[in-house]
Image (tube, rainbow, N blue to C red):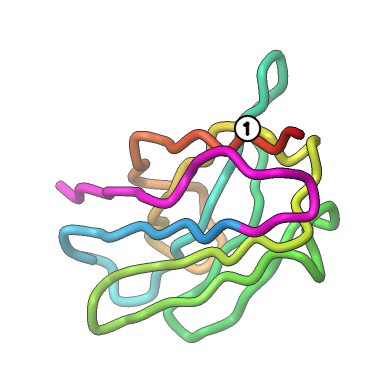
Amino acid sequence: QVQLVESGGGLVQPGGSLRLSCAASRIIFSRNAMGWYRQAPGKERELVGRITSAGTTNYADSVKGRFTISRDGAKNTVHMQMNSLKPEDTAVYYCFVASTYYSGPNYWGQGTQVTVSS
């Protein structure tokens, strides 16, 4: 079993920044990916972005150029720097670990709320 602990959510004004972090208790897959989904009220959960154990990243079009995912492999930790935040970024953000580079999540974090509002 893998536990994921998230931190860094909160309330921020439009145009502001937040940094989310997610620490995994262990990574049991040699070729894996970590990243983030988000779910806004009344909407389906959507992929925000991911980073593979090889360091490759990909992002949803809606966050490209504004969000950056990085990873500390030695600490099994992933970070997401979110800049130029918009009200439509308001959602619960969920960290995940996947067993291959591009498969669906095998483990989820508990979620952290991000609210962008003036």
Residue 79, percent from left and from top? 46, 67
Quarter of the image for the C terminus: give it.
Answer: top right
Q: Residue furthest front?
A: 118
Please provide percent x and percent y for residue 49.
Answer: 63, 59
Q: Position of residue 51 (x, y in %)?
A: 53, 71
Q: Position of residue 100 (x, y in %)?
A: 44, 65
38 lies left or right of 117:
left
Judging depth in this view, the residue of 35 and 33 nearest the camera is: 35
Task: Pick whichever, 117 or 36, lies toward us.
Answer: 117
Residue drawn at x 42%, y 36% as measured from the top left: 111
Q: Which residue is found at the position 57% from the left and 44% from the top? A: 37
Placement of 52 over or under 99, stated as above or below: below
Left/right placement of residue 93 relative to residue 75 reads right
Q: Amino acid at mark 1?
A: Ala
Based on the picture, tell me whether residue 3 belongs to the magenta stretch: yes
- In the structure shown, which secondary structural element does the residue marked by tag 1 occupy? strand
Q: Is residue 110 above or below residue 55?
A: above
Circle 1 is placed at which residue position? 91
Q: Nearer the viewer, residue 75 or 8?
A: 8
Residue at image point 41% right, 67% down: 78
Extreme residue toward the top, this view = 42
Q: Which quarter of the picture shows residue 91?
A: top right
| Residues packed near mark 1 inside 10 Å, few (<14), some (14 to 19) or many (20 plus) | many
Whether the magenta-drawn stretch holds residue 70 is answered as no
Image height check: is 102 above or below 112?
Answer: below
Tally the marks: 1
Please give the range of residues in magenta.
1-17
* Residue at (36, 46) in percent of width and height: 106
Specify the quadrant of the image occupied by residue 33. bottom left
